[in-house]
């Protein structure tokens, strides 16, 4: 995540991003789910995809709407405008808090008293001088539900997130092998994580999203892990066309699917992981080794290693074989 540090000066001061800016309008868009986003975690043969990624890419949807508002502002007042949706070094959450949309909860996500924490944020920078709104106060109180539910203990303190342990970071941004000590904690989450969002008590005021393009696609609500593991490049691109998942790429996505397969406890899924041992990607092959070490009987896995390990040229994959055979990090063979 070096990109966060690369332009830190612009994040700290919007005028460095655009010297002409005089006011910033922050807008939120509700993407509340129609059902409990955590219900699918109990279905080990299925994949869990974060609520925000179950349909169209929100960047495209929100940017179009922001441009409509910005055009109206410019036409009425004659001011110059620029719109941003996660595409520039803009500190949307602190700005949204200052604008009164909500407050940054202990899980670092913006919480609204009207919509809970299911909000996309977008910003309109303008040269117009606009009167500021009153900031929102923190209403978290003594609650720590979001902190306590985190599967990987990614919150070392309230309001502090260690992205290196966050499942959303690991499944979306992280490019290499997922740390072995965190894999078993990820369950069947293959893209993002909604745990800390879903348990916020302010969601009692949340509403289901009204934007049709944000409604969950049936095929992405609880897709089969076996079906996802079988996606080649063309099928991956077709299934996730227009989705934020496509930007992560097939390699990392299949890596995530293999972690979920390894966590499933279902020997029937071993065949899906076995086929992926022949992938060109070392990242996929290495994760397939880990998944198989958790699904195959010990004797079968040792026999498989004897056939495959010596022919593996990539050292990271060979290390996966060695660590799996040794049962490192407390991961004994079944």
Image (spheres, grey):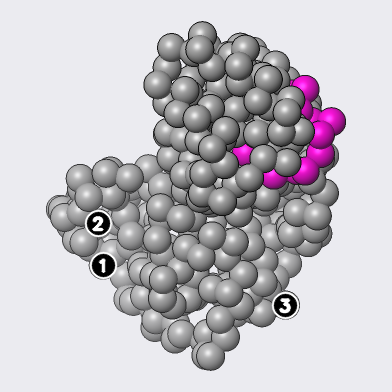
Q: Main secondary structure of the magenta part?
A: helix
> In the image shown, does 193 or 134 lie closer to the viewer?
193
Q: CA distance from mark 3 to mark 1?
A: 36 Å
Foreground of the two, 9 or 256: 256
Magenta stretch contains residue 270: yes
Residue 211: within the magenta? no
Q: Counting other residues with Cα less than 10 Å from the Cα at mark 2, is it few (<14), some (14-19), or many (20 or more)?
A: some
The reply to whether callout 1 and callout 2 are in contact (CB within 8 Å) is: no
Dot label at residue 204:
3
Above or below, 228 against 126 in this view is: above
The percent coordinates of residue 3 (x first, y second) are 28, 43
41 or 96, which is in the foreground?
A: 41
Q: Residue furthest bottom?
A: 142
State the extent of the magenta-drawn residues as a range.
259-273
In the picture of the structure, the residue carrying the numbered disc 1 is 129
What residue is shown with label 2?
11
Alpha-carbon span between mark 3 and mark 2: 32 Å
Circle 3 Cα neighbour tier, 10 Å, few/some/many (<14 / 14–19 / ≥20): few
Q: Residue at x 36, y 67 (%)?
A: 95
Residue 32 location (% of width, % of height): 69, 60
Q: Residue at x 32, y 54 (%)?
A: 90
Q: Element at badge 2?
A: helix
Q: Are marks 3 and 2 in contact (CB under 8 Å)?
A: no
* Distance (Cα) linking label 1 and label 2: 21 Å
Q: In the rendered view of the protein, which quadrant contains the N terminus?
A: top left
| Horizontal relation, residue 281 to residue 87: left or right | right
- Place residue 205 in its image quadrant: bottom right
């Amino acid at each position: 995540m070096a990109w966060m540090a690369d332009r830190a000066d612009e994040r700290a001061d919007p005028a460095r991003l655009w010297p002409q800016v005089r006011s910033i309008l922050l807008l939120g868009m509700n993407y509340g789910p129609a059902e409990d986003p955590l219900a699918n975690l109990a279905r080990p043969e299925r994949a869990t995809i974060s609520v925000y990624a179950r349909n169209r890419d929100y960047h495209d949807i929100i940017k179009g709407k922001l441009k409509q508002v910005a055009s109206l502002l410019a036409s009425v007042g004659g001011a110059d405008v620029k719109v941003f949706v996660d595409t520039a070094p803009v500190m949307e959450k602190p700005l949204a808090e200052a604008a009164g949309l909500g407050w940054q909860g202990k899980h670092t996500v913006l919480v609204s008293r009207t919509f809970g924490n299911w909000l996309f944020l977008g910003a309109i920078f303008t040269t117009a001088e606009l009167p500021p709104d009153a900031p929102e106060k923190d209403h978290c109180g003594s609650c720590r539900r979001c902190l306590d539910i985190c599967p990987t203990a990614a919150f070392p303190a309230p309001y502090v997130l260690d992205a290196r342990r966050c499942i959303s970071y690991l499944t979306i941004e992280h490019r290499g092998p997922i740390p072995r000590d965190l894999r078993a904690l990820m369950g069947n989450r293959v893209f993002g994580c909604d745990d800390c969002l879903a348990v916020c008590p302010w969601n009692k005021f949340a509403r289901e999203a009204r934007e049709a393009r944000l409604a969950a696609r049936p095929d992405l609500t609880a897709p089969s892990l076996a079906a996802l593991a079988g996606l080649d490049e063309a099928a991956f691109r077709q299934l996730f066309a227009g989705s934020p998942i496509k930007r992560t790429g097939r390699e990392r996505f299949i890596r995530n699917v293999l972690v979920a397969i390894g966590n499933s406890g279902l020997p029937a899924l071993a065949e899906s992981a076995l086929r992926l041992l022949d992938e060109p990607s070392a990242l996929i092959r290495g994760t397939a080794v880990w998944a198989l070490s958790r699904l195959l009987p010990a004797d079968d896995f040792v026999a498989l290693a004897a056939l495959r390990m010596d022919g593996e040229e990539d050292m990271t994959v060979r290390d996966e074989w060695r660590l799996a055979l040794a049962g490192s990090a407390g991961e004994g063979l079944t």
